[in-house]
Image (cartoon, rainbow, N blue to C red):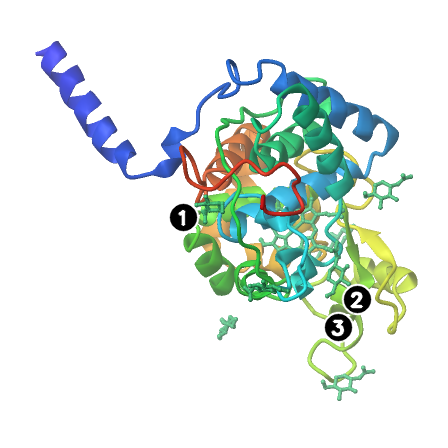
Amino acid sequence: MKATFLLLACVVLLGLSSGGQADELKKHFYKKLCPQAEEMVQDLVWASVESNSTLPAKLLRLFFHDCFVRGCDASVLLDSTANISAEKDAIPNRSLAGFEVIDQVKAALEKACPGRVSCADIVALAARDSVSFQFQKPLWEVKTGRRDGNVSLASEALADIPSPGANFTRLVQQFASKNLDVEDLVVLSGAHTIGVGHCGIIRNRLYNFTGKGDTDPSLNATHAAFLKTQCSPTDRTTTVEMDPGSSLSFDDHYYVILKQKEGLFQSDAALLTDGKSSKIVDKLLDDGDFFDAFGKSITKMGNIGVLTGTDGQIRSNCRAVNR
Ligand code: HEM
Ligand SMILES: *[C@@H]1O[C@H](CO)[C@@H](O)[C@H](O)[C@H]1NC(C)=O
Ligand SMILES: *[C@@H]1O[C@H](CO)[C@@H](O)[C@H](O)[C@H]1NC(C)=O
Ligand SMILES: *[C@@H]1O[C@H](CO)[C@@H](O)[C@H](O)[C@H]1NC(C)=O
Ligand SMILES: *[C@@H]1O[C@H](CO)[C@@H](O)[C@H](O)[C@H]1NC(C)=O
Ligand SMILES: *[C@@H]1O[C@H](CO)[C@@H](O)[C@H](O)[C@H]1NC(C)=O
Ligand SMILES: *[C@@H]1O[C@H](CO)[C@@H](O)[C@H](O)[C@H]1NC(C)=O
Ligand SMILES: *[C@@H]1O[C@H](CO)[C@@H](O)[C@H](O)[C@H]1NC(C)=O
């Protein structure tokens, strides 16, 4: 009876998994192909972060932008060509950075194991390792075996990357289209516990919310007054911390400031406009299990539309398709 049940469970599980490419990702995919790969990524990324503490935010955001457009296929790394404007040149690229770290890791891996380790896996590992430097141990597990895509289109980034002005309904829609649910939306937004945003993105919130010279009422008035001292009405280039005072520390403090109505973007504030979403915020704070939740959700994100097996290619230069 027990055996039959186990057998049945296995069949069901296999049946469920056969459809999703994500399950072709493996723990330590490079164990035989390039045994030192994961350690090399960690060493190089940690050295970079040690000398530049803003990098975890850059590399984490890069992973998000990669996965949301055409899946986690390193399309975000491709440079534009003479006739094609790539994702990184789309408006929502909004200051994507960290590319030179990926290039450095890739160069080292090409030397150690030519043609073996994909740019897409480097992006996934670099996001994890950069954030984890603070803890000196990996904060979540990354399965590997992703392969690199051939296509990167600015127009797709425009369509698939959520706007900082998006309302809750729109955010839920855009996450659902990537098989991510409301829990994932709330948990992954917690990434805004590190990093900065540009004044240009919030100036309407501060100075002209409805076109009448007003301030967004969903923004904490005290905080709005502070932000106005940082961002003049015409300033697009200054940056402000998304989790003030804690923007280099990966922690659950984002939810604390969110509840004080200090989330930097409308898309942050939007998480409090829905009952279910608000409850998730409270629960994350009450249970103190943001790290576990983040690990689960970013693993889902890292499975979006991955190319595996013989699909795609292993780029030799992350900025260009192999020719
Ligand atoms: C929910 C929808 C989201 C929206 C609308 C959004 C929007 C933005 C915007 C507008 C910025 C500021 C860019 C700039 O001014 O330079 C930003 C920064 C950032 N985002 Fe998001 N984001 C979202 C979700 C995510 C997710 C899921 C992650 C990662 C898992 C993420 C990670 C980051 C990080 C780390 C930064 C800081 C980058 C830096 O310091 O340079 N975001 N986001
Ligand atoms: C882009 O331009 C090159 C020549 O400059 C051409 O060979 C190639 O087919 C073009 N690609 C597309 C997608 O139009
Ligand atoms: C982002 O796009 C703009 C053009 O919209 C471009 O000037 C800029 O170099 C791009 N940023 C990156 C990192 O590629
Ligand atoms: C840190 O890295 C960011 C992103 O690559 C870069 O813009 C910045 O200039 C670097 N800062 C230092 C001090 O090297
Ligand atoms: C949310 O934004 C979408 C456009 O992105 C808009 O069509 C919709 O009316 C908005 N919903 C609410 C409740 O404001
Ligand atoms: C505020 O927005 C309105 C409507 O979009 C616009 O006509 C006006 O010029 C804006 N004012 C400023 C100071 O940007
Ligand atoms: C605004 O922020 C301050 C701390 O900066 C906090 O004490 C206050 O409760 C916040 N107001 C609201 C409405 O959340
Ligand atoms: C990418 O290009 C390579 C080489 O031209 C080709 O073998 C592969 O099928 C292409 N992959 C995808 C996903 O288009």
Q: Are marks 1 and 3 in contact (CB under 8 Å)?
A: no
Report crowding for label 2: few under 14, some 14 to 19, many 20 or more residues within 10 A (C-alpha).
Answer: some
> Residue at point 67% right, 19% down?
112
In this figure, which residue is indicated by the disc labeled 2? 200
Residue nearest the observer in this picture, 115 or 291: 115
In this figure, which residue is indicated by the disc labeled 3? 204
Looking at mark 1, is its residue's CB closer than 8 Å to ligand 1?
no
> Residue at point 46% right, 57% down?
172
Residue 39 falls left or right of residue 240: left
Distance in Å between CA atoms under marks 2 and 1: 31 Å
- Looking at the figure, which quarter contains the N terminus? top left
Say which element carries label 3.
helix
Looking at mark 2, is its residue's CB closer than 8 Å to ligand 1?
yes
Residue nearest the observer in this picture, 77 or 69: 77
Looking at mark 3, is its residue's CB closer than 8 Å to ligand 6?
yes
Report crowding for label 1: few under 14, some 14 to 19, many 20 or more residues within 10 A (C-alpha).
Answer: some
Q: Can residue 255 be seen here? A: no
Q: Can residue 313 be seen here? A: yes
In this figure, which residue is indicated by the disc labeled 1? 179
Type of the residue with mark 1 = Asn
Distance in Å between CA atoms under marks 1 and 3: 31 Å
Type of the residue with mark 3 = Asn
Picture quadrant where residue 111 is located: top right
Please provide percent x and percent y for residue 102.
Answer: 71, 36
Please provide percent x and percent y for residue 94.
Answer: 72, 59
Say which element carries label 1.
loop
Q: Is 244 situated above or below 220?
A: above
Picture quadrant where residue 282 is located: top right
Give the mark, 2 or 1, whose residue is nearer the N terminus: 1
Say which element carries label 2.
helix
